[in-house]
Amino acid sequence: MNNLCNSTSVQIEGGAIRGSICGSVVRFLGIPYAAPPQRFELPRLPVSWDGVRNMDDPGPPAPHRIRPFPAIDPSPLVGHGSDGSDGDYLRLNIWAPREAVAAPVMVFIHGGGFVAGSKDATVHDGSAFAASGVICVAINYRMGIDGFLPVPGAPTNLGLRDILFALAWVQRNIAVFGGDPANVTVFGESAGAMAIADLVTSPLAEGMFARAIIQSGHGAMVREIDVAQRLVRKLAKVLRIVPDANGFLPVSNTDAMDALDKVAKPWAIDLRDKDGREPVYGISRFIPVYGDDVLPRSRSTRCIKAPGATWKLSSALMPMR
């Protein structure tokens, strides 16, 4: 902890946590909003703890690989990647104004094509938001095979379910940090924006947020489950496994990332739908699917209402053809 900073403690569900006060900003890094995820299992609450846990380490990101860029260090924008050896990555960071009372809350969802990215990239630091009077929350979520592959026998859209689980955590706990749970804005860029555009239409997001800011993405970037399961079969062939949950369960993170690299080639797989449309133009193989309880329909116009608030968000469109 910086010598110019002081410590502060709060009680959240699960136990007490200690953060730092640096000038006008209070910071808590690496708060577990869910237990370490098990492949293809729904998110669940972390185990409670005794004593006070220090929240000065953001923890690991979700398993993903960052490819090198010639003469450029991409880490300030996308983070450093992770081999997945530390699976306790369903965490969030909070930056809050000192002595905040009913402050507005902004929850950031990072991008990265649903296969890469981290809440801890330098550009995602929320200190400036806190200094201006806004509580900023940044989260990790499952990606790639674990988060966005509709494997038979496993829940679909687990990455979106992680985001919903984190938003529910914010609703239950943000008042402890001086935030107003009825004044939550979700915002994100690229894949994070696509995820938010989807959740604006999701019946499971009711009451989770009042407003949404969608930056460089839209809700039409989703696939039918049947089309996305072509990717399941392709990956299973690459990995030499049965294309179901039991086949994917023992696959290591390293083998999974190697397989992702292979299917990322432009010629590796055709994911166009019956109308010849590829919703993300081949940019990413992994995107949310529709036809489940998270995203029941391919087209939806839906309003999201914050608890105790008036209607603030009008509508969002899912795929248009």
Image (cartoon, helix red, strand yellow):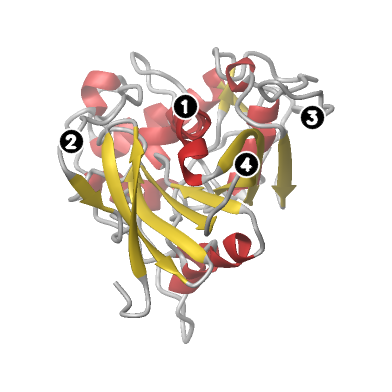
Distance, label 1 to label 4, CA atoms, is 27 Å
Q: Amino acid at mark 1?
A: Arg
User: Mark 2 or mark 1, which has the lower sequence index?
Assistant: 2
Residue 17 higher or lower than 36, as above or below: below
Q: Position of residue 96 (x, y in %)?
A: 52, 55
Q: Residues within 10 Å of mark 1 (few under 14, many from 20)?
A: many
User: Mark 2 or mark 3, which has the lower sequence index?
Assistant: 2
Q: Which residue is mark 2?
A: 49
Q: Position of residue 240 (x, y in %)?
A: 23, 33
Residue 123: which quarter of the image?
Answer: bottom right
Q: Amino acid at mark 4?
A: Ala
User: Mark 4 or mark 3, which has the lower sequence index?
Assistant: 4
Q: Which residue is mark 3?
A: 316
Label number found at residue 161: 1
Helix, strand or loop at mark 2: loop
Q: Which residue appears at 52% of the width and 53% of the height?
A: 112
Q: Which residue is mark 4?
A: 102
Does residue 60 appear in this view?
A: no
